Amino acid sequence: AEARRLASDVLARTPLAGVAQRVLARVAEVSGDEATALTHYRIAARRAPRDRPPHAWLANHAAARGDFITALAHTDQLLRIAPGLLQETLPTLASFAAVPDARVALLRLLGETSPQWRAPFLYWLSQQPDALPMMTALLSPLRAAPQPLTGYERSLWINRLLGESRVAEAQFLWIESLPPERSKSIGNIVDGGFELPPDGDGFGWHFDPVAGATIHQEPGAGMHGAQALVIDFHDRRVAFAHVRQRLALPPGHYALRGRVRLDGLRNERGLLWQVQCDDGRLLGATERFHGSSQWRDFHVNFERPAEACNGQQLRLRLDARIAPEQMIGGRVWFDDLRISSIKH
């Protein structure tokens, strides 16, 4: 009664006082008068839009009655007011994603407004066990939403697919996101001529930084395109394995082919290209490259087995067994890398 009296006094002096409306709403709620509480909470949310309790109550009230659009609108407002509440709100957002009718409302909010908590929520979801079906149900429609998936959000989906060995699906999603100039270079190896900058993501080239070597692309005589892969080694010990690309080969027999030029590559063991399953099993390896030569061809045949090798890696590495064998200097060029199916 005292709370009601004080709130009424405030409203008599300041009719737009939202917090006083919230107090009256709470009084009605405690008294069991839900209809009156709803009226006051709605007024409080309009007049004091940054006051948290009205939004929290209205979100719960709407969700309990299946009004998911209203529930999510208040949840979104609450997270805009207090971003620090996101961690404790994430399971609630996931519960919306799990219910078909609620998921429709969630997708509408995510796709039309892309709230600031969208990416953190999708990241959290990508880390949860058994979350891939829910991720797919959310992210697939967002591909064509007014606010479509960002590259970061798509990468969360791709990485989760890769983590569950669904490599073909992950590759499709990656290819779908490519601009036209990159789409033209798609094959079993993407951009085997090294004509485009490495994108460092998905199924493109990854050039990982490494001390003691410089990885780049440049033009030169004898190459087939505008440029080739060039690696300069600076006469230091380097555990080199820093040029790689993820593959998605179906079972079968293949040939890895390419061209190499060697400019005084000094190392006891040499560099080689390897094709491996994601679990580390070696499928094939080229000759070891060292010394000097003009442009020449190389190739190796290998088999991608039918069992337990859904994802593969193509990697250039130094074939060093012990630390002294990691000392390397000179320059090497690679061009026209390709993997083609062969009859066996």
Image (cartoon, helix red, strand yellow):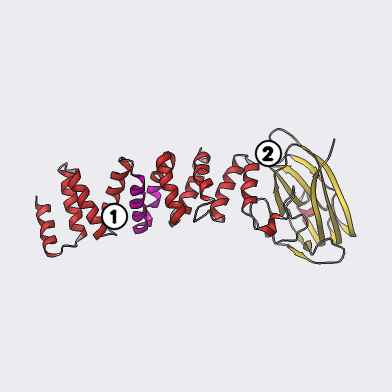
| Separation of residues labelled 1 and 2 (CA atoms) | 49 Å
Q: Nearer the viewer, residue 136 or 327?
A: 136
Q: Residue at x 21, y 58 (%)?
A: 19
- Place residue 95 in its image quadrant: top left
Image-based side of 20 in relation to 232, left or right: left
Residue at which label 1 appears:
52
184 up-or-down from 254: above or below: below
Q: Nearer the viewer, residue 231 or 310?
A: 310
Give yes or no for residue 17 being in the magenta stretch. Answer: no
Label 1 environment density (alpha carbons within 10 Å; few <14, some 14–19, many ≥20): some
Report the amino acid beneath label 1: Arg
Give the mark, 1 or 2, whose residue is nearer the N terminus.
Answer: 1
* Element type at mark 1: helix
Give yes or no for residue 85 being in the magenta stretch. Answer: yes
- Which is the main secondary structure of the residues drawn in magenta? helix
Q: Residue at x 10, y 60 (%)?
A: 9
**Residue 255: percent from left, percent from top:** 82, 44
Q: Nearer the viewer, residue 193 or 90?
A: 193
Q: How many numbered discs sit on the rendered protein?
A: 2
**Residue 293: percent from left, percent from top:** 90, 59
Residue at which label 2 appears:
310
Image-based side of 316 in relation to 73, left or right: right
**Residue 183: percent from left, percent from top:** 69, 54
251 up-or-down from 59: above or below: above
Report the amino acid beneath label 2: Asn
Q: Nearer the viewer, residue 302 or 41?
A: 41
Please state, as top left, top right, bottom left or bottom right, where the C terminus lies in the image. Answer: top right
Do we see residue 157 in this rendering?
A: yes
Range of residues picked out in magenta: 67-90
